[in-house]
Image (spheres, rainbow, N blue to C red):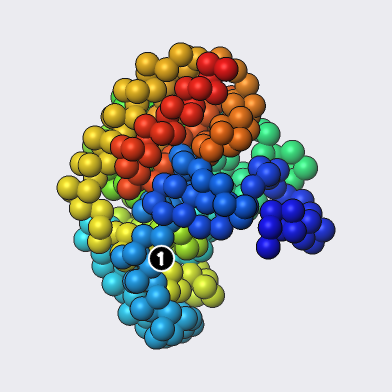
Amino acid sequence: MNFSEIKELDEKYGAKTFSRFPVAFAGGKNATLCDSDGKSYIDFGAGIAVNVFGVNDEAWKNAVVDQLNKIQHVSNYYYIEPQARLARLLCEKTGAKRAFFANSGAEANECAFKTARKYSFEKYGEKRKRIVSLKDSFHGRTLFTLSATGQDSFHKYFAPFVPDVVNTVADVKAVERASDGKACAVVIECVQGESGVTALDRGFIRELAAYCKENDVLLVCDEVQCGNGRTGKFFAYEHYGIAPDLVTTAKGLGGGLPIGACLFFGKTENVLTAGDHGSTFGGNPVVCAGACNVVERMTDEFLSDVAVKADYMRMKLEKIGGIKKVTGLGFMIGLEVEKDPKQVAAECLNRGLLVLTAHKRLRLVPPLTITKTEMDEGLDILEGVLKA
């Protein structure tokens, strides 16, 4: 099908929930994509931080196809080998004790929030059930995770929200006031992606971790976007030297297939028991086979290479005219630009470069395997757009 045919079908039958760019992609290799009409693009978006190895990665594809040739789905009433292997890989890599698998970041966060409430209920009764999150955060689009999302723009139309979920500024005194002795958990993103790609202050996070530990309030790190090698560490919280009680992740974990995971550390290890939570598709064997390939390849050498390439891209971005500020961490990059970021993104697309936006900034989250040649080609396009 050509682009016009694809667009006509989508606009006739698809839900009108997305504001799409006028392009449909048909293939590619690594960080170079090809659309349905044969035009090539450099990809600085990776499907919103999902395609960590770009597209058409042979090792990842082989892992997925090998499992697909065996069995495509097994109910969680039975044991599933790729799921068990993935749980072990994640626990060995992070120090977590157990893992629960879902299908998205929102579902992983739902699991974490439910775990926090049960943990607190069993120790303190029903009065300590508050979830505290931060302003400018984003935790998902279900009603529970939307309640925890600290951006009013996402809340319009959908009230009433889940009670006892509050948002506050990134200040420990403010978190303490918002908790008011009733909090079971505080949830943070070490790098807030959807509000402009902002890395939280190191001092704040370390002070918050100490507050949570002292008051037996669970610290939840949402690593849905900033995890899985994106910042040069497997998880972004590693940059801050903290030990969270629950970690959620998704996006890059599957390498292109839908998965979410909630990791349980220390005192949360045995909170959930049979019947407390579940998922029909969570831990699907084909998806887990792809995720195993992702985690196995996140070696120290690979992550060090990601950090080096991210530093290279950031260094070049700092020298481009029209960029006022570079934010974020590693390959999770926010750009404050002089022009309207949405117009910049549209013109980049016209010239063969995919970039994302996050509120008033551009957002760059390229495949972790992007080459220097692909980076240079994409940065040249971006510079041309900003200078035009």
Residue at horizontal 53 percent and vertical 38 percent from the top: 352
Left-right relation of 172 to 33? left
Badge 1 density bin: few <14, some 14–19, many ≥20, Cα 10 Å: many
Q: Give the SS element for disc 1.
A: strand
Nearer to us in this view, 349 or 361: 349
Nearer to us in this view, 201 or 31: 31
Residue at horizontal 25 percent and vertical 58 percent from the top: 297
Can you identify the residue that label 1 sits on?
100
Nearer to us in this view, 76 or 114: 76
Residue 234 locus on image (x, y percent): 29, 48
Residue at horizontal 61 percent and vertical 55 percent from the top: 36
Q: In what quadrant of the picture does the C terminus appear?
A: top right
Can residue 109 be seen? no
Can residue 328 be seen? yes
From what the image shows, is residue 91 above or below residue 41? below
From what the image shows, is residue 320 above or below residue 140? above
Dividing the picture into quarters, in which one does residue 273 lie? bottom left
Q: In what quadrant of the picture does the N terminus appear?
A: bottom right
Residue at horizontal 72 percent and vertical 49 percent from the top: 17
From what the image shows, is residue 120 above or below residue 276? above
Left-right relation of 98 to 193? left
Going by the numbered disc 1, the residue's amino acid type is Phe
Nearer to us in this view, 297 or 371: 371
Q: Residue furthest left?
A: 301
Residue 115 locus on image (x, y percent): 45, 58
Residue 209 locus on image (x, y percent): 32, 36
